[in-house]
Structure formats: C-alpha cells, structure tokens
Amino acid sequence: MPLGPAINGAARRVPVWAVWIAGLAPAAWLFWQAATGGLGVEPVEALEHRLGELALQLLIAGLAVTPLRRHLGVNLMRFRRALGLLAFTYVCLHLAVWLLLDVQTLARVWEDVLKRPYITVGMAGFLLLIPLAVTSNDWSVRRLGSRWRRLHRLSYLAAVLGGLHFLLLAKGFQLEPLLYAGAILGLLALRLRLPRRQAA
Amino acid sequence: GAGIATLAGRGRAAEALEPNTWEEITTYNNFYEFGTDKTDPARHAGAMTIAPWSVRIDGLVDRPADYALEDILSRMTIEERIYRFRCVEAWSRVVPWNGFELADLLEMAGVQSGARYVAFETYLNRDEMPGVRFPVLDWPYVEGLRLDEAMHPLTIMATGIYGRDLPKQNGAPLRLVVPWKYGFKSIKSVVRITLTAEQPPTSWNKANPREYGFYSNVNPEVDHPRWSQATERRIGAGLFARREPTQMFNGYAEEVAGLYEGMDLTKFY
C-alpha cells in the first residue's frame, strides 16, 4: 500500500488543535522540569537550549510540509500554519529565557546582539519571523493574495539563520548542528529542483 | 583539619567559599571524550578503565618512567583544597578537591634546568569513549602550563572530591586543577606529563586559537569572542538566580598575578 494515502487518511482524523496541544506540551513540561530540578543542576542553560532545539525542529517540520506533499504525496498542509506558529512561539520562549533568566541585563543583551555574530544571526532570524506570525491569519492571507506567498518565503531565510545560529555557537567541531543545518539546506534544495521537474 | 589550615595560608579568596553539592559537581561536566552534552560524562564515563593506572613522566626530567598511580600516591601528601572552578562557558562552582601539589610530583621525577613548560595528555580509548568517534577536537586531549604555573603551590593534581575517589566524569583517577584558569586547562584523566623547553600545543588552542589562548587565565576584562566573561552563573543557584561578577584570576589574583607581571593579558589571553 502506498504510504501517502495511508498517512493522509490518518492525518485527516487529527484535528489541528491536537497539533497545538502536542506542540505546546513540551514547553510546559520543560518549564515545570526546570523549576523542579528535572533539568539538572544548571536549569537555565538546559531550558534555553531545549527550547531553541524545539524551535529549530518545528521550523524544519514546517519546511518539510511542501516537499512531503510534492515528492511523497503526504499532505500535511492543514497543520502547516500551526507548525509555523509553534516554531515562532518556541523562538519567543527561547529568546525570553535567554534575555530574562540568562543574560538578565538589557545593556548586555544589546551588547551581545551587536558584538556576537551568533546572537546577531539568531536575532535576525527572530525578526524575520515576526511579519510571518503577524500575517498568519486568514484575513491577511486573503488580503495579501500572491504577495502572502512571497512574504512567507522569508521562512526559508529565517530557518537558514536559525541553523547558522546553532552552528556558530557550538564549541569544537560538533555533529548535531551540522545535522540541523543539513536538514534545513536539504529541504530548501528540494524546492530548488522543482521547476526543472515541472518543465520536463 | 589539614585542609582548612592550608586554605588559611592560601589567601582571602578561599575563606568564605561554600562548596557545591556532590550532585552539582558530578552531574554537569565537560569531558568531550564521552559526549558534548553536560550529562554525557556522568552517563558514559563508567566504561573507562582506571585501574591499573600509570602516568608516563618524560621529557626534560632526571627520572623519566611510567609511574604506577599507587607508587605516586604512596609518596604524595593528600590534602583538601576548596577551590572556585570557573568554566570558560561562564558558569562556576566551588569544589572541595583532594589532591597533592603538582610541584611535588614534578620534583619526584626531577625537573631538569632546561625545562620551561609542562605538557599533559588525557587517556584515550576509542572503545570506552563514545565521544571520540567524532572529531570534536583533535584527540587525545592535550594541555600545557608554563613551568612556574605548574610549580605554583595552588596547582594541584586532584585524586578525590569530598574525601571520596574522583568520579570518572570528573577525570578519575588523577587530574590537574589550576584554579585561576578556565576549567578546560585543568586536564582530566592524565596519562602523560612531559617537561619541555618549548610551549606545548593545547587542544582548544589548536581547535580555535582566536577563542582559546595558551594561558586562558580567568579574566573578566577579556571577553571570549562569543560571550562576555564579566559575569558567571553559579551552578546549583537555580532558575532565577542573578549572575555573579567574575573575579580577576578567579579570585586568586593575590597569589598568582605576579606570574604575569609585565604581560599584556589581552594579547596573552
């Protein structure tokens, strides 16, 4: 049996709110754990890193929706907005933990944004996501028409900046940030090849 | 008793130190041979063989040899040293080490007059260390000190914490502790000590010379290129704790600042 229709059939029965609940549950769990000792003896760093990783994973999931449909016939389009907004939520939480619990001083936050390339890059990625979150409602989609699709291609750049942010902050030569960057670039590359296939 | 007496002679910095708990010291570690997550060493270091253990002491010494750990320990005086530990990643804690002065070990081997530096090497076993499958660093891990830093009375080889054997994730059975330098200088699970005339290569300096210098003295005024070193987060202080100011030479300036007189610490970072 082809995989696509089977998954599509199952996915049709999943309400979008369930994706929201499943998506937000890890955040609630992480904050609870951080407050009660479940994240170990340095909860701030653990919380900050886990939230950042989840944001990247959700960005990647959002980027995977279109290639999954085009290349494997798996249609998860209904969940794409939720995935995108969840990714934005996690970026905001990651940023809030960094700002309020980690760095703590606004002057140092600003200094870091200006002086540390990995933070500059991460902050740029966050800023790019703001117009996308703001225009994620039905009214904006209708109102912007074809411009909406063009605007939301900013998510490609935001994901690349997110992956770069992770690469730049790793100490030594580490595998994990490379895997994330590879996934992001791979999902974008699948889009690049598309016009040729259509032409053939 | 002996430990406290020793500390009193080691300056004001040590007096008010409140050690972190055993859990705080042994569950949050950097030992990249076992993985890059802070919890990896506690999870994976159990596989490391630490007995029998010997340390090769060679280079510019009168008595180069493979010294069995028991022989070393039988000739050293173990004392307690409660030191601040400041990681280059801007976290810190206080550790009640047990150990002996490195100077005593070097004198046992007989330092020759031409020696100016001390090179150290960590144990490496691909079957026991899952982290070395990926070239995070150029294995084995190596570190180095100038001879006067190595001979300084604050510089110790640790064999325990809280009077118990050193846990493997903390660098069992024998590790260096240099309290005024960033933690990565305090090389773990030492198998070789070589006295040299030239400054030896060090792992993090090889990996990223712009970010990690040979000296790596704790210095709130010289930032790591990717983060400020002006403040630090105290391990175990909890989710809402304020950052604390980092002290020059990690609070040991009175004892060690003289070693670097006349040196530009922004250049020799």
Image (cartoon, coloured by chain):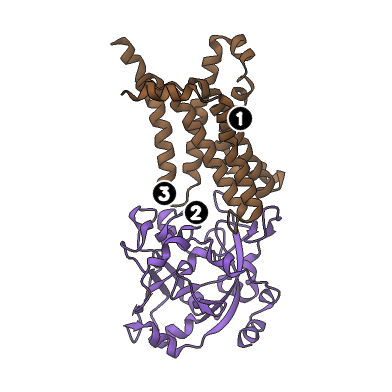
Amino acid bearing label 3: Gln
Query: Residue B48: horizontal and vertical position, in percent?
Result: 37, 68
Q: Is residue B3 visible?
A: yes
Mark 1 or 2: in front is 1
Question: Contact (CB < 8 A) between labels 1 and 3?
Answer: no
Crowd tier of the residue under label 1, counting other residues whose Cα lies within 10 Å: few below 14, some 14–19, many 20 or above: few
SS class, disc 3: loop
Q: Earlier in the sequence, mark 1 or mark 3?
A: 1
Q: Which residue carries the number 1 mark?
A: A127
Q: Nearer the viewer, residue A109 or A187?
A: A187
Q: Are marks 3 and 2 on the same chain?
A: no
**Image point (40%, 20%), residue name:** A69
Residue B115 relative to residue A18: left or right = left
Q: Quadrant of the N terminus of chain B?
A: bottom right
Query: Residue B103: horizontal and vertical position, in percent?
Result: 48, 83
The alpha-carbon separation of the residues under discs 1 and 3 comes to 27 Å
Q: Which residue carries the number 2 mark?
A: B211
The alpha-carbon separation of the residues under discs 1 and 2 comes to 28 Å
The numbered mark 3 sits on a residue in which chain?
A: A
Give the number of the disc on residue A174: 3
SS class, disc 2: loop
The chain assigned the colour brown in the figure is A
Q: Nearer the viewer, residue B196 or B194?
A: B194
